[in-house]
Amino acid sequence: MPKIKHLDSLLACRAAYAGLLFVLALAMMACVRFHPKPISAAASMDDFEARRLDAPELREFLLANKEVKDWPPAVWDLKALTLAALYYHPDMDVARAQWGVANAGRITAGERPNPSVNPLMGYNATSPIDEVTPWIPEISLELPIEVAGKRGFRIAEARRLSEAARWNVLSAAWARPGRSGAACAVLYSNSSRLSGPNPS
């Protein structure tokens, strides 16, 4: 008989140990680290003032788009200046960042909600204090279950938002050539005005 009691206590300890490991595994799966990326106005201003037409990153961008054959180009034509405007324009950065956020939303939309474990403390007012403690430790395990196809609808919505953000990048890129052409026309008009009439 003592051997059976010892075996029961051993099995109970193993079950408690397994339950504790299960709870710790669930808690570790729910941990997500936050990495702050503060915005510095001074760093943004330095980055803006460091932009120039002879930057090596711009050279790689223009060579990848096959608009220039040698570097630096002998003449900056409208196509090369338009690509430089696309490369440096903040609207393109904003549109690309929004597209990145939408793509990240596609990943998070497919995730299932994490279970949560909450320790609780109960109190039994009817138990005699001299025999047993009235405090009752408890653990609440919540397993959220999504029904009615909510996850599928969420994934489809995130996919549409990502596609809309991609078209927004193309729309922002499409609006830049017209502005670059207008700026070149204004520059040509002003330079011809400043140079004065051409004597014949």
Image (cartoon, helix red, strand yellow):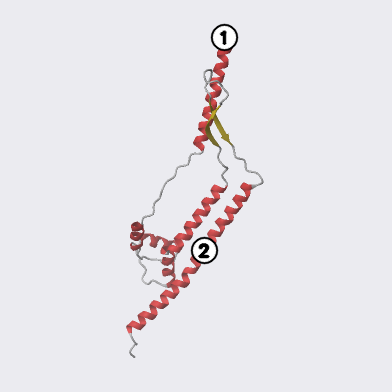
Kindly state the secondary structure of the residue where label 2 is placed: helix
Task: Determine crowd level at label 2: few under 14, some 14-19, many 20+ residues with C-alpha closer than 10 A.
Answer: some
Quadrant of the frame with the C terminus: bottom left
Asked if the residues shown at circle 1 and circle 2 are in contact, with their CB atoms under 8 angstroms apart, the answer is no
Between the residue at mark 1 and the residue at mark 2, the CA separation in whole angstroms equals 78 Å
Residue 112 appears at what percent x and percent y?
A: 58, 42
Residue 11 appears at what percent x and percent y?
A: 56, 19
In-front residue for pair 54/164: 164
Q: Which disc is residue 41 wearing?
A: none
Kindly state the secondary structure of the residue where label 1 is placed: helix
- Locate residue 69 relative to residue 119 in the image: left or right: left
Q: Which disc is residue 2 wearing?
A: 1
Residue 187, placed above or below residue 131: below
In-front residue for pair 74/96: 96
The residue wearing badge 2 is: 170
Inspect the image, locate mark 1, and give the three-letter code of the amino acid beneath it: Pro
Query: Which of the 4 image quadrants contains residue 146?
Result: top right
> Residue drawn at (59%, 12%), measured in percent from left and top?
4
Task: Determine crowd level at label 1: few under 14, some 14-19, many 20+ residues with C-alpha closer than 10 A.
Answer: few
In-front residue for pair 13/99: 13
Residue furthest out toward the bottom: 200
> Residue drawn at (51%, 39%), measured in percent from left and top?
30
Q: Nearer the viewer, mark 1 or mark 2?
A: 1
Residue furthest out toward the right: 148
Quadrant of the frame with the N terminus: top right
Inspect the image, locate mark 2, and give the three-letter code of the amino acid beneath it: Leu
> Residue drawn at (33%, 85%), measured in percent from left and top?
196
> Residue drawn at (50%, 31%), measured in percent from left and top?
24
In-front residue for pair 170/91: 91
